[in-house]
Image: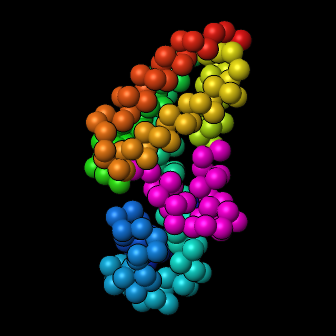
Amino acid sequence: MADRTALTPAARKVLDAASRLFYEHGLHAVGVDTIAAEAGVTKKTIYDRFGSKDALAVAYLRARDEAWRTLLEETLAARPQPGPERVLALFDAAQAWSGRGMGRGCAAINARAEVADPQHPVALEVARQKAWVRERVRDLCAEAGLARPDTLAGALMLLYDGALAEDGMGTAPAPYATARAAAQTLLGAAGSA
């Protein structure tokens, strides 16, 4: 993940501006000229600090992922005992994340929807992030003593990603609460390992 403390002040300004613009408008809709103007730097500064727009997009996704992981781990720390409630913390953290006024759903899902090539750096970064969440959920299920944690993690990821996507579309009320309730039912039916 990108270490924001290792960035120069100009690079931080670029990343902050790009992050706002990419999330609000999408990767393709935002050009380097717009990012440079928003950050108060030259295009040369962007290329000197990040190398390419694609690399800047990956840095944006990594910075958001780092913040998300921090929130998730803080939420899990408040529920240290293994069990279904600790697994369900995923949905509570996602609700809290959404409550920060994001409004457009999952940045990773949105970014991945913009690239067709599965080997594109953005697609690879999104796959890495989603694999981490799935593995974290699998570990939580295993710690809870639930049967078939791999299969269960896959089903929970569908609920989680569905809630993230629904949050961005805004076509149904309370997507995280709905996904959490479905996950709770699923966990209750899972049985012990």
1 above or below 175? below
Is 107 magenta? The answer is: yes
Give whichever of 84, 171 is nearer the camera: 171
Whether residue 13 sits left or right of residue 158 in the image: it is left
Q: Residue farthest to the front?
A: 171
Q: Nearer the viewer, residue 96 or 49?
A: 96
In this rendering, position of residue 10 left or right of residue 113: left
Magenta residue span: 105-131
Q: Where does residue 87 sit, x and y in percent of width and height?
A: 53, 24
Work out which quarter of the rendered image holds the N terminus and state it. bottom right
Which corner quadrant holds the C terminus?
top right
| Residue farthest top in this picture | 192
Is 97 covered by the magenta stretch?
Answer: no
Instruction: Pinpoint residue 33: horizontal percent, then vertical percent.
Output: 40, 87
Specify whether residue 74 is in view: no
- Would you place residue 16 above or below residue 77 in this image? below
* Count of marks, rendered view: 0
- Is residue 127 visible in this depiction of the protein? yes
The picture quadrant where one finds residue 140 is top right
- What coloring was used for the rendering? rainbow
Q: Residue at x 35, y 78 (%)?
A: 39
Q: Is 91 located above or below residue 130 in the figure?
A: above
Above or below — where is 69 with respect to 33? Answer: above
Q: Residue at x 54, y 84 (%)?
A: 47
Query: Left or right: where does residue 118 sit relative to residue 158?
Result: right
Position of 65 with respect to 143 (left or right) is left
* Residue located at (51% from left, 66% from top): 114
Which residue is located at x 47 percent, y 45 percent?
68
Q: Main secondary structure of the magenta part?
A: helix
Instruction: Measuring from the top left, give residue 17's x and y in whole percent.
Output: 37, 71
